[in-house]
Image (cartoon, grey):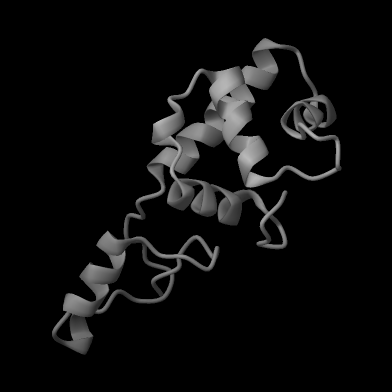
């Protein structure tokens, strides 16, 4: 119920809302939506898509741009450096927690690399 995005994570706002419910009648039913706090991650994903389109990169070329060590996987540090270089994001705004959540959203296997 808390993990409506099915990524193995829930934000604090949703967690607090669910545990503050006092009666079973007010618990949201399965499939109903409660806002998640994944705005930053969703914005970053859109920024990456826009960057790839602007630079006329297909999915493979865009992936290779973020795979800085050419290992076939994008690490969190590689993602951080790429976001700063390609999207001119502020390094300090890319916290470990935000990166963890971003990777949970985009990683099919929910691992430390994409």
Spot occupied by residue 42 in the image (x, y as percentages of width and height): 48, 40
Which one is in front, 77 or 21?
77
Spot occupied by residue 71 in the image (x, y as percentages of width and height): 86, 42
Which one is in front, 50 or 98?
98
When the figure is inspected, residue 111 is found, relative to residue 92, above or below; the finding is: below
Spot occupied by residue 27 in the image (x, y as percentages of width and height): 26, 79
Residue drawn at 67 percent across, 37 percent down: 78
In this rendering, the count of numbered labels is 0
From the viewer's perspective, is 47 left or right of 78?
Answer: left
Q: Quadrant location of the N terminus?
A: bottom left
Q: Quadrant of residue 35?
A: bottom left
Residue drawn at 62 percent across, 19 percent down: 51
From the viewer's perspective, is 97 left or right of 64?
Answer: left
Q: Which residue is most to the left?
A: 22
When the figure is inspected, residue 75 is found, relative to residue 100, above or below; the finding is: above
Residue drawn at 79 percent across, 30 percent down: 59
Spot occupied by residue 102 in the image (x, y as percentages of width and height): 54, 47
Q: Quadrant of residue 61?
A: top right
């Amino acid at each position: 119920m808390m993990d409506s995005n099915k990524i193995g994570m829930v934000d604090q706002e949703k967690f607090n809302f669910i545990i503050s419910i006092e009666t079973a009648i007010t618990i949201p039913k399965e499939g109903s939506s409660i806002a998640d706090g994944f705005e930053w991650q969703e914005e970053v994903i859109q920024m990456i898509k826009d960057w790839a389109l602007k630079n006329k990169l297909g999915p493979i070329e865009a992936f290779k741009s973020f795979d800085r060590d050419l290992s076939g996987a994008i690490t969190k540090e590689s993602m951080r450096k790429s976001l700063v270089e390609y999207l001119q994001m502020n390094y300090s705004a890319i916290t470990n927690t935000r990166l963890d959540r971003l990777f949970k959203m985009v990683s099919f296997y929910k691992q430390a690399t994409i």
